[in-house]
Structures are given as C-alpha cells and as structure tokens.
Image (cartoon, rainbow, N blue to C red):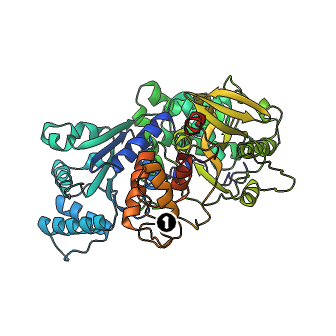
Amino acid sequence: MYKEYFGLEEMPFSIAPDPRYLYMSEQHREALAHLLYGFNSDGGFVLLTGEIGTGKTTVCRCLLERIPENSAIAFIINPKLTVEELLATICDEFGVHYPEGNKSIKIFIDLINSYLFEAHAKGQKAILIIDEAQNLSADVLEQLRLLTNLETNQVKLLQIILLGQPELRDKVSRPELSQLSQRIIARFHLGPLSRKDMASYVRHRLTVAGVKEQLFSDSAVNRLYGLSGGVPRLINVLCDRALLGAFAHGKNRVTSSVLKRASREVSGKPGMAFYLKKGYLWTAVFAIVAVLGVVFAAAYYSRKQSAEIVSPPAAGLRQETAPNISPSVTRDEKDVSASGPVPENALRPGRLTSEQSKITAFQSLFREWDLKYDPQKFTSACDYAQTQGLRCYYQRGNLRSLIILNHPAVLRLIDGKGLEFYVTLTDIKGDNAGVVIGDTSASVPLKDIEALWLGDYILVWRSPSEYQGEIKPGAKSALAPWLDRQLSLIQNVPYRGGDNMSYDEELAERVREFQASSGFIPDGIVGPQTIIRLNASDGSNAPRLAKEETKRKE
C-alpha cells in the first residue's frame, strides 16, 4: 500500500525470515558462527536460543544458504510430538518410506539409520533442525539424544540443531537430561538489539528494500527503541504500521508522533508504552502477536549453495561472474560526504556522488592489478575485467571472508543517512585497513569500516583457462591437472601429472584438505572461492590484502 508512495521495491519490514534482510549485528554474527561451527563438526547438538522475535529463525535460514547444496535437511516446525510422531516426521522430511500405520520405534530407527548411512556414502551431510524446541518433551529429547548415537567409526551421521526460547536452556540443564547437555557442542543466546544496532537495523532493511533516504526521523528512532526494546520482530511490526500511518497522512517520513500513534494501533490501549514502563516487555510482545495473528513458520528453507567459507557470517554464493552491481545513484544525487555523521576517520568520499565514488573505486581496484580502467570505454567494470583475462566475483560476506580470499575488493558503504558510496579495500594489517576513497589513500580501523558496511563487495580474480564452472568430485574436467599442480606446490606433495586426469576421489580429498585448512566448508566442490584462495596461496603475483604474505613469498 505504501510501497510505491515511498519508492520501495519491496516491503522492508515483513516478518518473514528473509536472509537478505538479516542485519548482522555482532551477536548475530556470533550466532551464525556457532551454527556453522556445529554444522562442520562431527555431530552432536547445536543450541540457539533467544527471546521471541530476536531472529533465531532468520539466522538459521542464513545458515541453510551457506551449506552445501547436496546436504540432507529435515526441518520440524511443530515439535509437540510423541516419540513415534517425531520419528515419523523425521522420515517424512528426509523422504524415507515406512510401513503405513507403523508404530514401532525400532522400525523407524532402522529406516532412519539406513538412510543416514546411504547419505554418508554419497558424501551428503544430514542435518535435523527443530524450531520452537522448548516445546519438546523430556522423552522426545532423550530419543533425539539416542539418534546422535547413529555413527560410523569416524563421524556421527546426524547433526541436530535446536532453536528455542530461553526455557530451552533451562530444560536441557535438568539433571535427567545431563547426557544430552554433554553432547551440545555449540550454544548461543540471542538478545535484543542495542540502540545503535537498532538504528542500523532499520537503515539496513530500508536500503535492501530500495530506499536510500532515512524515512524515520531521529526522534522516531529514539522512540522506536523505547517501544520495541530492540526486539527485531517488534521493530518490524511498528515500522510497518508507522510507514502506513505516514502514507495515510501524506507525510514524507515517520515522525515520533506518527510512531506513537502506530504503537497504539498495533497494541491497543493502554498501549505498549504502558506495558514497557511497567516492565512487562513480553506482555507487549504477546499482545502484538495476538492482535496480528502472527504465527509464521517456514516449512522448507531454500537449499541454495552458499559460502565455502566457514566464518561469520560466511561468504556467499559460488557465482562465476558478477551480476550488474551498479546500484542506481541516490535520487537527489547529494554529496555523500555531507550526508550526516560518519566515524571520525578517513572514510569520507569528498564531494563525489555515489556513482563517481564507484568509478574511482574500480579504478583503484584495477590499479592493484597494474591495469588502467577507463569508464569512457567500458561502462561496466566487469566487461573490462574480462578483456584482461579476469572475472568479477560479487558477494556479501564480512571482513573475515575477505581476509581468507586475500584479494583487494570494492566495498559498498552506507552512511548515517542511508546514502551509498564506494571505497577500495587494498590491504589489512592487524586491526587497520588500507583503503582508497576517491584519489585519497588512508589507513582506518577495521571497526569503522564494519560500522558502515552491510557486507556487499566485489573483487576480480584470474581463473585458469581450463575453468568452465564449478566442478564436483568424480567429474571429468580439464581443470584437474591444474588443481593437481597447484596443490602439489602448496601441500608439498608429488605432482601426479597427466593431461587426462579426472577429478577423482584422491584429488578431491586433497582439495577438501586445502579447503579445511583455508577456513572453507570442505565439500570438495571447486568454485571461485577455492580457486581464488589457491591463487593467493601459490606465490603468484596477484595482488593481496596481506601484503606481508606477498613479501615473505617473494
């Protein structure tokens, strides 16, 4: 209704757990890191708890976009089940057929065990995710513990992730569940956002939805924190209603009074402010949920292959070339540097517009490769890259992702008023980074970059001439001899040689070893990230973020 009025491409405050809208606060990064760690471990339980609406399900969905595509995933959204119903639901989710009307626990477990062994033989990792796990009974939790006994001589066959409210922590701490508690290999508790994170959260969601301007006044943002307590779901509900109210009254932005009126409409008198002043924050939460009838559950999550990198929040998709990443210039083409408060460092693009800062950033990026990019001849930086034997790689990740890839990159930053600009990240030393903004080079603290960066980056990389797209173990590919040569240099093992090599299991195992040592998910799938890291590890003259590493190898 208000989408067109404010120039939005999407509804920014939907409560659906879309990972594109996930704002990675420090604690959300840690939560995702714990889930990734648990996924890459040899089995056991991973526990993610948090109050209602703090983002547990969204973080979990973000995890699912970062695990191998061939993973076997069972997702249970209604955990109020008997042991027999639980096992039947697990079979249904994994696609395991069982005799109609079966009530035998042994038959269910035998079938699940057979399925897990088959999945393991195919190189698949099986993961069971249970949402609202605080509703699991003690006997069902005990049966889940017994399922983690299904194992080979080396690894357990089933990884279990439990998502739930704080009561889940108390439940698994009971003496009768001590054996289950001992098998929890990673646990994390999500709390509400801080005031600072909440403001960034609102700005982030508006930016993803296509609006650069700040649609909420400073006073409205301050009031929003008092009304929501920093709970993301409450923030979404209030912001959605407030934008509707601003639209209805013909206002260009949400003011404090509009937000206050929206709060009354959402919660009903005496209003959320009353409950919050009385200390009944979660009473307000339940009031909102009851009024709106919000009972959201994602039955199946996207199983897109995402990051190879095992780091919070993990890097992203194995894309070979970048989509067009040239976002439209801000509607009023304001001077980005005059757009509001930014950290007190060199992250200021002078009097460049968004588009101008993007062009200069790419020019700086290509200078790192000893190339000269002329935007008058090539309107697309990635088209120019192809003429030089390079490929573009566009992704969303974090600084850890870039450190692992070890290549300079163009970062898209958002200032305090939602206006975008671009800088080139050229090197990282300790807690500081070398950046180029326009024609100016500077050293800035990494934390100042993170304060303005939503994770979007683009780098260029050189692929072998034999590379035609990602390859999986067992495939016939002309890239296999190249992989063998690169790994022989890095791992100091004999070169097998031969132009007719296939990507066999022996070579795949060496790739997995390299991926694991580099911080990737060791799935043996060779895509851009694996090749980029191979190039950054073999002593080649490609530019690197870690300049000291280059010097050592020279």
Tell me: residue 241, above or below residue 527.
above
Q: Quadrant of the C terminus?
A: top right
Q: Which of 246 and 154 lies nearest the eye of the viewer?
A: 154
In the rendered image, is residue 263 in sight? yes
Report which quarter residue 510 is drawn in. Answer: bottom left
How far across and how far down the image is residue 77, in percent?
34, 56
Q: Residue at x 80, y 49 (%)?
A: 373
How far across and how far down the image is residue 196, in percent?
56, 29
Q: Residue at x 82, y 56 (%)?
A: 378
Report which quarter residue 119 is drawn in. Answer: bottom left
Tell me: residue 349, above or below residue 13.
above
- Graded by Cα atoms within 10 Å as few (under 14), some (14 to 19) or many (20 or more), the crowding at tag 1 reads many
Residue lying at the far right of the rendered structure? 376
How far across and how far down the image is residue 343, in percent?
66, 25
In the rendered image, is residue 305 in sight? no
Residue lying at the far bottom of the rendered structure? 100
The answer to whether 400 appears left or right of 331 in the picture is left
Q: Quadrant of the N terminus?
A: bottom right
Tell me: residue 107, above or below residue 290.
below
Q: How many marks?
A: 1
Residue lying at the far top of the rendered structure? 344
Three-letter amino acid code at disc 1?
Ala
Where disc 1 sits, the SS reads: helix
The answer to whether 388 appears left or right of 258 in the picture is right
How far across and how far down the image is residue 21, in percent?
56, 48
Report which quarter residue 382 is drawn in. Answer: bottom right
Q: Residue under circle 1?
A: 480
Q: Residue at x 20, y 57 (%)?
A: 151
Q: Which of 250 and 95 lies nearest the eye of the viewer?
A: 95
